[in-house]
């Protein structure tokens, strides 16, 4: 009987092992659990440091740097000359040959001596002298109700970089004067012509529904910097537009 029981025990153990294998092993070799397909983890290097990911772009691909476009009222963009910045400014049109000369009025006999060794015309009434700072001379028209704008005539050392030609220097000076006009002002050229030792530009400055007449005269008196004369008169004082010609014809260098 002991032999019979021992045989039954062995047979029972075989059945249990077979049932356990049937549960653990898949019924077919290709049977896998469904799930997302992922890349296998990278094996760590022998030094234990993290693996280096592959480059995302070709090593030969080098980004191309573009020059920044100059904008009005800002410093000069890298890589641009002063004249290139001028031509990129939409407020200042190209000065073409269609812009003619203007007849110049007699400057009169009264002058003001600028400390930079040149003479500027002393404009007739209602113009009057005013505190010059930060300029070297200053004349103004009376204030008007309802507006802060009034005629002004100033002289000073050239506030911008001198160019090879006096015409180009005058162009840059005219652009600089927009800092002294209302925001959004734009230039329309009225006259362009040489003067003794320099150049004169006359132009209209438009801002909204109003405008001013203006002029710049650049003269080189042999000092470290040329001199600039700038006059601007708003349309509310248009009777004094005739004095702009006096400025253009009256600026003189001593010596």
Image (cartoon, rainbow, N blue to C red):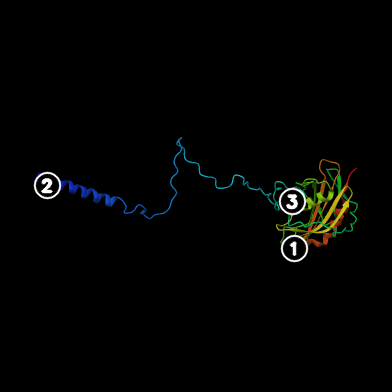
Marks 1/2: CA–CA distance: 123 Å
Q: Nearer the viewer, mark 2 or mark 3?
A: 2
Disc 2 packing (10 Å; few <14; some 14–19; many ≥20): few
**What x and y, as percent, mark residue 50?**
47, 40
Considering depth in this image, is 71 or 7 the residue closer to the camera? 7
Answer with mark 1 or mark 3, whichever residue precedes in sequence. 3
Q: Nearer the viewer, mark 1 or mark 3?
A: 3
For the residue labelled by badge 1, is the local secondary structure a helix, a strand or a loop?
strand
Q: Are marks 1 and 2 in contact (CB under 8 Å)?
A: no
Marks 2/3: CA–CA distance: 110 Å
Q: Which residue is mark 1?
A: 210
Answer with mark 1 or mark 2, whichever residue precedes in sequence. 2
Considering depth in this image, is 175 or 214 the residue closer to the camera? 175
For the residue labelled by badge 3, is the local secondary structure a helix, a strand or a loop?
helix
**What x and y, as percent, mark residue 65?**
66, 48
Q: Is residue 110 left or right of residue 132?
A: right
Disc 3 packing (10 Å; few <14; some 14–19; many ≥20): some
Considering depth in this image, is 196 or 181 the residue closer to the camera? 196
**What x and y, as percent, mark residue 192?**
85, 55
**What x and y, as percent, mark residue 183?**
70, 57
Q: Which residue is mark 2?
A: 4
Q: Which residue is mark 3?
A: 85
Residue at the bottom extreme? 209
Marks 1/3: CA–CA distance: 27 Å
Residue at the left extreme? 1
Tell me if I can see residue 11 in this picture.
yes
Tell me if I can see residue 121 in this picture.
no
């Amino acid at each position: 009987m002991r032999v019979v029981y021992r045989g039954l025990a062995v047979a029972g153990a075989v059945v249990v092992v077979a049932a356990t294998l049937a549960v653990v092993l898949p019924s077919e070799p290709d049977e896998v659990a469904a799930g997302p397909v992922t890349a296998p983890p990278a094996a760590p290097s022998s030094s234990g440091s993290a693996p280096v990911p592959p480059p995302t772009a070709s090593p030969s691909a080098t980004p191309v740097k573009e020059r920044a476009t100059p904008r009005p009222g800002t410093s000069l963009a890298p890589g641009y000359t002063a004249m290139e910045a001028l031509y990129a400014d939409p407020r200042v049109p190209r000065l073409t040959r269609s812009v003619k000369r203007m007849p110049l009025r007699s400057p009169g006999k009264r002058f003001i001596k600028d400390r930079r060794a040149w003479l500027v015309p002393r404009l007739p009434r209602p113009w009057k002298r005013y505190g010059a700072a930060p300029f070297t001379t200053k004349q103004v028209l009376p204030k008007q109700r309802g507006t802060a704008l009034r005629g002004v005539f100033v002289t000073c050392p050239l506030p911008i970089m001198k160019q090879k030609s006096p015409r180009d220097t005058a162009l840059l000076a005219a652009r600089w004067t927009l800092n002294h006009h209302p925001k959004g002002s734009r230039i329309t050229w009225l006259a362009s012509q040489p003067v003794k030792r320099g150049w004169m530009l006359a132009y209209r400055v438009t801002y909204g529904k109003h405008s001013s007449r203006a002029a710049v005269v650049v003269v080189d008196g042999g000092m470290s910097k040329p001199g600039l004369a700038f006059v601007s008169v708003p349309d509310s004082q248009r009777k004094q537009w005739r004095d702009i010609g006096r400025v253009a014809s009256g600026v003189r260098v001593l010596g």
